[in-house]
Image (tube, grey):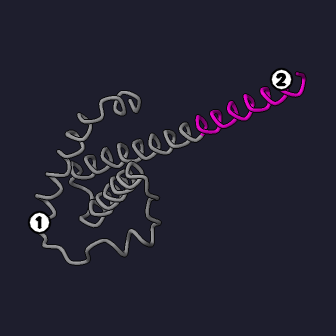
Amino acid sequence: MVHSKDKELEVALELFNAELEKQKSKEKELAVVKKAEKRKAEAVKALQKAEKNPNLSKEEKEAAKAVWLKADDDLKRILAGEEPLAEEEAKEEEPTSENTEEPQAEEEAKEEEPASENTEEPQAEEEAS
């Protein structure tokens, strides 16, 4: 009888520990997602600020855009269950030739895109604020 109670206690403890590990894993995943969302929000603000600043050079504006694109891509990868790209890999995937007229229209469209994405994830926006 004593042996069966010890065994039951042991099984219960194993189940509890397994559930605890699952909970810790979920919390870590949520923390990674929140961090990526925060980076993206900061990048969006920096890009909008750069676009409105007439004193910044085109290169500085492009750098702000690149940071936003990387943050956006990282968040999408994380939400898809993938690892974000390292800096070197991200640079290799960027297109090297662009028209000078196209980025402006693309930037304006992408500035509107974060607002529409935020409506899809209202909880994330509330937590980030």
Give the label, 2 or 1, closer to the camera.
2
Residue shown at 38% from the left, 29% from the top: 129
* Secondary structure found at label 1: helix
Residue shown at 44% from the left, 59% from the top: 84
Main secondary structure found in the magenta portion: helix
Query: Is residue 15 within the magenta segment?
Result: yes
Q: Quadrant of residue 8?
A: top right
* Secondary structure found at label 2: helix
- Asked if the residues shown at circle 2 and circle 1 are in contact, with their CB atoms under 8 angstroms apart, the answer is no
Residue 75: image location, x then y, percent:
38, 50
How many angstroms separate mark 2 from mark 1 (CA)?
A: 72 Å
Decide which of tag 2 and tag 1 comes sooner along the chain: 2
Mark 1 closeness class: few <14, some 14–19, many ≥20 residues within 10 Å? few
According to the picture, the residue beneath numbered tag 2 turns out to be: 5
Residue located farthest toward the right when viewing the structure as drawn? 2
Q: Which residues are magenta?
A: 1-24
Residue shown at 26% from the left, 74% from the top: 95
According to the picture, the residue beneath numbered tag 1 turns out to be: 102
Query: Is residue 14 within the magenta segment?
Result: yes
Residue 67 against residue 45 in the figure, above or below: below
Quadrant where the image shows the N terminus? top right
Foreground residue among 53 and 86? 86
In the drawing, does residue 5 fall left or right of residue 56?
A: right
Residue 67: image location, x then y, percent:
36, 58
Residue located farthest toward the front when viewing the structure as drawn? 1
Residue 20: image location, x then y, percent:
65, 33
Foreground residue among 62 and 121? 121
Mark carried by residue 94: none
Residue shown at 73% from the left, 35% from the top: 14
Amino acid on which the number 2 mark rests in the picture: Lys
Residue 45: image location, x then y, percent:
31, 44
